Amino acid sequence: MKGRWNGWPAALAGLLVAFAACAAHAAATQYGKTLVVTRDVPVEALAKFAAFNAKNRNRADLIPDTVDWAAEAMGAPPGGNPYTIVIKALGVVESDGEVSARWMPGWSIDGVVRGSLVPSTRMGGAKAGERIELVTVSQPLSFKAEREVAPVIGFAGSQNIRFDTVQVEVWSGVGKASFVQLLGAWSPLLVGLIFLGLFLWWRRS
């Protein structure tokens, strides 16, 4: 019976190494390689967001209206492709339950805004008076030639939260893979290690 388990230590060690690698990479996950710009949305814009939300709170349009705010223009050389906008909205929960926010991040290019609605950011189980942060990430965008562009965020509405701080970040480059992506990449190795362990156990039995 003792020999039956001789092959498991190596297989188990391999699995632990693989999962440790995934966890280590997940801890270092970012939205890109380099943080290029950080901008705080001014109080005046936050007031416009709140007024817009009060007027349109119960609307659920497929392509909603938005109230926009644009940061200062920045250089976007192709060597930094792709560029990703990250919206970090901090606010106070109004009542117990789920909170959500809808944003349309985009870019002002030659005076024309190119934006795309991303899925609502949601958080369940929030408590009234609790301060929470909802993070929304745009789709990465690459530029063919160096140009001046301005990050733009379109506020499409929120539920059960009153934002008092909104920060916009621009990241350049490809970020490190998420834990789920890494797990998918490692899955063939993990399956192989499991079958190796089973094979060694079968030979020893």
Image (spheres, rainbow, N blue to C red):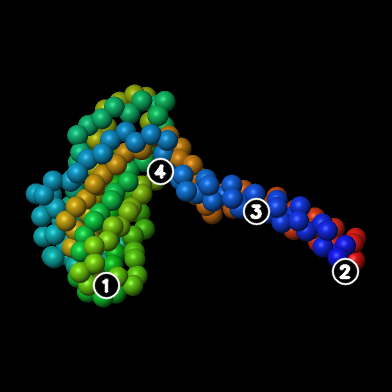
> Which numbered circle lies on residue 16?
3
**Percent x, y of residue 38:** 26, 39
Distance (Cα) linking label 3 and label 1: 37 Å
> Which numbered circle lies on residue 174?
none
Looking at the image, residue 110 lies above or below residue 58: above
Q: Would you name the residue on which mark 4 appears?
A: 31
> Which numbered circle lies on residue 1?
2
> Mark 4 or mark 2, which is nearer the start of the sequence?
2
Q: Would you name the residue on which mark 1 appears?
A: 127
Name the front one of labels 3 and 1.
Answer: 3
> Mark 1 or mark 3, which is nearer the start of the sequence?
3
**Percent x, y of residue 58:** 21, 70
- 89 horizontally vs 8: left or right: left
Answer whether labels 1 and 4 touch (C-beta < 8 Å). Answer: no
Quick one: label 3, few (<14), some, or many (20+) residues within 10 Å? few
Distance (Cα) linking label 3 and label 2: 24 Å
The amino acid at mark 4 is: Tyr
- 167 horizontally vs 81: left or right: left
**SS for tag 4?**
loop
**SS for tag 2?**
loop
Name the front one of labels 2 and 4.
Answer: 2
> Mark 4 or mark 3, which is nearer the start of the sequence?
3
Extreme-front residue of the structure? 2
Distance (Cα) linking label 1 and label 4: 28 Å
Quick one: label 2, few (<14), some, or many (20+) residues within 10 Å? few
**Most foreground residue, 112 or 50:** 50
**Most foreground residue, 62 or 93:** 93
